[in-house]
Image (cartoon, rainbow, N blue to C red):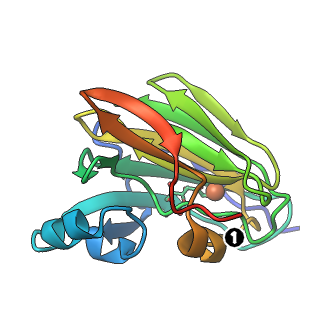
Amino acid sequence: MEYKAPLGVKIEENGVIPGAKKLVRRLSDLKGYFQDEEAYEKLLRENPVVYEVYAVEQEEKDGDLNFATTVLYPGKVGKEFFFTKGHFHSKADRAEIYYAIKGRGGMLLQTPEGKAEWVPMEPGTVVYVPPYWAHRTVNTGDEPFIFLAIYPADAGHDYGSIKEKGFAKLVVEENGEVKVVDNPKWKE
Ligand SMILES: O=C(CO)[C@@H](O)[C@H](O)[C@H](O)COP(=O)(O)O
Ligand SMILES: [Fe+2]
C-alpha cells in the first residue's frame, strides 16, 4: 500500500495558502450574474478582482478531502454586494464545511427547487452545507472576507443552473443596511 504524505500548512494573514493552486475571478468572469447591468458595465472598465481561491486538491476519489481558502473582496455592483459565482456540487449529494476567518459576510444556500436560505458569517462561524444545496458567499463588509472550505475530493463544481437562474434571494445594501431581498428576476 502506498500512503500519501500528511500535510500541515499555515494560512497566511491575507488568506493565501502557500503552495496552493491560485484561481482569480475578475468582474468580467461574472458577466450576467449581477442584477444591475448598467452598474456592471460601468465597473467593468476597472474590471476589479472579485475573489481569489487558493485550493489544495486531490484526485477526484471517494473518501479524500480538498480544502481551499477564498478571499472575497469588498465591493458592490449597484446595490448588490460582491459574491462568488455559486454552485451545486457535480456529485450533488456531497456536503461541505466552511469556516470564516476574517471579515464579514454570509452564505446564500438554495435547494434545487429554489428554497433559499441566508446564513450570516463572521470570524469563527462554521457553516454546514448539507448535501444537494447550492451555495454562494457574499461579502457584506468593507474588508476582504476570508474563509476556508473543506469538501469531498470527488464533489466537483456544477455552475450551470446558478449561472442561468441565479439565486431566489439577493443580498443588497439599502440605506446603509444589509438586506436579503427576493430576486425580482427569479423564475421557478
Ligand atoms: O464551495 C467551494 C468548493 O466546493 C469553495 O471553495 C468555492 O469553490 C469558492 O469559494 C469559490 O466559489 P465558486 O466560484 O466556486 O462558486
Ligand atoms: Fe462547494
Query: For the residue carrying disc 1, how many other residues have a C-alpha within 10 Å: few (<14), some (14-19), or many (20+)?
Result: some
Residue that numbered label 1 is attached to: 156
- Residue 7 visible to an observer of this rendering: yes
Up/down of 180 relative to 138, above or below: above
- Residue 16 visible to an observer of this rendering: no
Q: Residue 39 in the image: x percent, y percent?
A: 21, 63
Q: Quadrant of residue 139?
A: top left
View quadrant of ligand 2: bottom right
Q: Residue 77 in the image: x percent, y percent?
A: 26, 56
Task: From the viewer's perspective, tell me whether residue 95 is left or right of residue 53.
Answer: right
Of 83 and 177, nearer the camera is 177
Q: Residue at x 77, y 68 (%)?
A: 154
Q: Residue 79 in the image: x percent, y percent?
A: 29, 47
Task: From the viewer's perspective, tell me whether residue 27 is left or right of residue 57.
Answer: left
SS at circle 1: loop
Up/down of 20 relative to 78, above or below: below
Q: Residue 38 in the image: x percent, y percent?
A: 22, 69
Q: Assign the C terminus to one quadrant of the image.
A: bottom right
Q: Assign the N terminus to one quadrant of the image.
A: bottom right
Q: Residue at x 24, y 48 (%)?
A: 75
Q: Residue furthest left?
A: 45
What is the number of callouts on the image? 1
Q: Residue furthest front?
A: 184
Q: Residue at x 58, y 47 (%)?
A: 149
Q: Residue at x 50, y 40 (%)?
A: 181
Q: Quadrant of residue 175?
A: top left
Does ligand 1 reach within 8 Å of label 1's beta carbon? no
For badge 1, the amino acid type reads Gly
